[in-house]
Image (cartoon, rainbow, N blue to C red):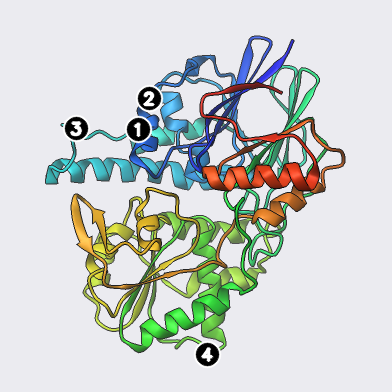
Amino acid sequence: MSVHIRFLGGAGTVTGSKYLVEHGGQCLMVDCGLFQGYKQLRLRNRDPLPVAPGDIGAVLLTHAHLDHSGYLPLLLKDGFDGQVWSTPATRDLAQILLPDSGHIQEEDAAYANRKGFSKHSPALPLYTEDEARQSLKRFRTVPMHQAFEPLRGWTARFYGAGHILGAASVLLEVGGRRILFSGDLGRPDDSIMLAPDAPPAADVVVCESTYGDREHPDEDLLAELRPALQRVAARGGTAVVPVFAVGRAQALLHAIAQLKSTGDLPEALPIYLDSPMAIHSTELFARHLGEHRLRAQQCHDMGHVATMVRNAEESQAIARRHGPKVILAASGMATGGRVLHHLVQQLGDHRNMVVLTGYQAPGTRGATLANGGTQVRIHGQDLPVRAEVVQLTAASAHADAGQLVDWLRSLPTPPRRVFVTHGDMEAADRLRHRIETELRWQALVPEHGSTWAA
């Protein structure tokens, strides 16, 4: 019997990763992500899946970022009753991210209803914080490199992918086929995370392409961040730094701790981490020593360089504090959360700065700012952008195009086919072309909803 892969997300776009593998009347899903960015993509989150959730036997998560895990509570709400398999660190992060996602959706819906700017009456969250907590009961954890059976007769194994804590590539063996899902691959030279493991042999590879059309610059994060923060501090402004609570927030805190220790930034410059999710994620690094590059003392320094802002009252008080300051707040593409309130407060002042720390998906507010937009829409209002916008290029937690090709090249034997996914169309197609011309392998970019034999 044949094995098929159905691409229900992450196809032709860099968000919403969902890959359904079907064989012998059974199926499982690799990743279960939310769509983010353009409205027409976000609307897919409310569309029913083309397969009944109750028919999906298991879910394998490559990592905890919401574009790979954030649909899980909705899948359970709609009838999924199987196990969710992940590494221990991914489970620990999901315990933070998923309830926070539900909480933010409830807050955003309540705010939209109070202000009356939603087209729906009433505005409803995709799922609640409580529904997200219920989904956590389905998790089963497996260490890296240990074989397990997510379904009877199906074998899987996690391999380190770098990127963030717990991130993995997944090798799935079923029906005589070996299918390798890259997940999001990290950089071999990442300042915090270990380099990805060498990939195992596979018949088919599903490879991400977030940075499939570009190379990272030689300049490091410290060299990029130092002059930006020095500039805004000198003019007495506020730097608002939208960060992903998992990964990017910790990289920025580690870099700021280094800049303060060398005297490149004043010790007295106030730094705030305004994200309970990022605070809890930062604390996890000390619990997972050996799964990243940081020593125990560096984890301590990273966790103490900023004032940890744990509630809404403290968050609101930051805006009333005069003088230079740096505010790190989720989310990384300014799609929701507390960073929106800081942007509302700070975007209109030319002394201030917005520091974008990585990839900004098309259709997000972060992309609008990165592309030089003179206004940005937040909470139903168009706000003028007078603050300086700085786009960091060295903070990315994703492998670039050359590093992706190098990872593929290190496969023990050439695969029969590479599916290029989780990238914008240009990035995915450029990586496809490099795979075909440099590696001489068959590669294609699958369309959303398409099904292919493995």
Q: Secondary structure at mark 3?
A: loop
Q: CA distance from mark 3 to mark 2?
A: 16 Å
- What's the residue type where badge 3 is placed? His
Residue 268 in picture, x, y percent from top left: 40, 86
Can residue 144 be seen here? no
Q: Earlier in the sequence, mark 1 or mark 4?
A: 1
- Which of the image's four quarters has the C terminus? top right
CA neighbours of label 1 inside 10 A, class few (<14), some (14 to 19), many (20+): few
Q: Determine which residue is flagged by label 1.
A: 43
Q: Earlier in the sequence, mark 4 or mark 2?
A: 2
Residue 191 in picture, x, y percent from top left: 64, 67
Q: CA distance from mark 2 to mark 1?
A: 7 Å
Q: Earlier in the sequence, mark 4 or mark 3?
A: 3
Which residue is nearer to you in this view: 48 or 249?
A: 48
- Against 425, is 283 above or below? below
Q: Secondary structure at mark 4?
A: loop
Residue 212 in picture, x, y percent from top left: 62, 50
Residue 273 in picture, x, y percent from top left: 40, 66
Q: CA distance from mark 1 to mark 4?
A: 48 Å
Q: Determine which residue is flagged by label 2.
A: 47
Give residue 263's mark.
4
Q: Residue at x 74, y 41 (%)?
A: 436
Q: Determine which residue is flagged by label 3.
A: 120
- Against 49, is 258 above or below? below
- What's the residue type where badge 2 is placed? Asp
Can residue 83 be seen here? yes
Q: CA distance from mark 4 to mark 2?
A: 52 Å
